[in-house]
Image (tube, rainbow, N blue to C red):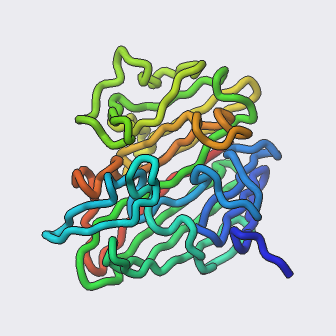
Amino acid sequence: MSEPITGAQYEISAGPYRAVVTEAGAALRTLTHHGNPLILTHGADEAAPAAFGQLLIPWPNRVDRGRYSYDGEEHQLDVSEPAFGGAIHGLVRWSPWRLSERRPDGVTLTHRLLGSAGYPFRLDLEAGYSLDPDRGLTVRITAANAGSRTAPYGHGAHPYLTVGEPIDACTLTVPADHYLPVNDRMIPDGPPREVAGTSYDLRDGRVLGDLTIDNAFTGLARDTDGLAWVHLAGSRHTTSFWMDDAHPWLEVFTADTIPAGTRRQGIGVEPMTCPPNAFVSGIDLIDLKPGARHTGSWGISG
């Protein structure tokens, strides 16, 4: 029998929520609420376009030219984004992950990240997805350093929120008071700037119109549980996203350059433990010592 290129498809459900997580990359391929899509999706036999639903480990976003120095040693990653000359979104997006636990409302996958020329470190990774009939989806990402030396580490994820209509007429709320400017190669160009008085001020909600965004945000306002919330409101319903305080950064992408059939039909909302190019800048980079673990959670509800 043939098998889809994204491997095994792990379906989970709880109340009005349904999701599918793939063996390839432990990625979130679909998520619905009462049958309405909450994220942009793709076919099981189709490679995830524009990083749809993928996990970004051990770094989110980009490393400039793929070159970085860590603990006195120089490293060269494969340049996986030739157009911008960078290494993008980590090393595990296309790797097979192993099933660790499966329940009707949840699934846990694991991956052994072995050392490579550009990243000579050894991590054990775990991605847990669970659904609750009231709260929706929770995703928990854990990395443990199983190697003999401290590893540079960061993680992120790449869901595209949708409300089933073009985002131009939708209202986006992002509780961030700073954004990170980038150059024409999408590498940070100076320190974070205040959003006040700019088109990046989304704190009180803004109709997107033709606004184009592909920037990281920080200085996130949080609720009493330490969660930062993003809301995409359309004419019929709202899709909401949260992330815990393990993620001080959030990339927002208005999906202007993804495949034409889904362009500006959703918005990339990417929780990140560190900003773009953190392997070079060191900003919020996690020094994961041998035997140490790092965990972060995020989720989506309809």
Q: Residue at x 43, y 42 (%)?
A: 250
Q: Is residue 225 visible?
A: no
Q: How many marks?
A: 0
Nearest to the observer: residue 26 or residue 276: 276
* Residue at far top of view: 197
| Residue 70 x/y as whole percent | 20, 66
- Residue 160 drawn at (x, y percent): 61, 44
In the rendered image, residue 46, in percent from the top left (x then y), is placed at 73, 60
Q: Examine the rendered structure and indicate whether residue 210 appears above or below residue 256.
A: above
Q: Residue furthest right?
A: 1
- Asked if residue 166 shows in the view, the reply is yes
Residue occupying image coordinates x 72% and y 58%: 19
Quadrant of the image for the N terminus? bottom right
Which residue corresponds to the image point at 82% horizontal and 46% vertical from the top-left?
35
Q: Nearer the viewer, residue 249 or 216?
A: 216
Q: Is residue 257 above or below residue 108?
A: above
Closer to us: 210 or 159: 210
The answer to whether 86 is drawn above or below residue 193 in the figure is below
Q: Is residue 193 left or right of residue 156?
A: left
Q: Position of residue 167 (x, y in %)?
A: 65, 28
Q: Nearer the viewer, residue 282 or 11?
A: 282
Q: Which residue appears at 75% of the width and 35% of the height? A: 164
In the rendered image, the quadrant that contains the C terminus is: top right
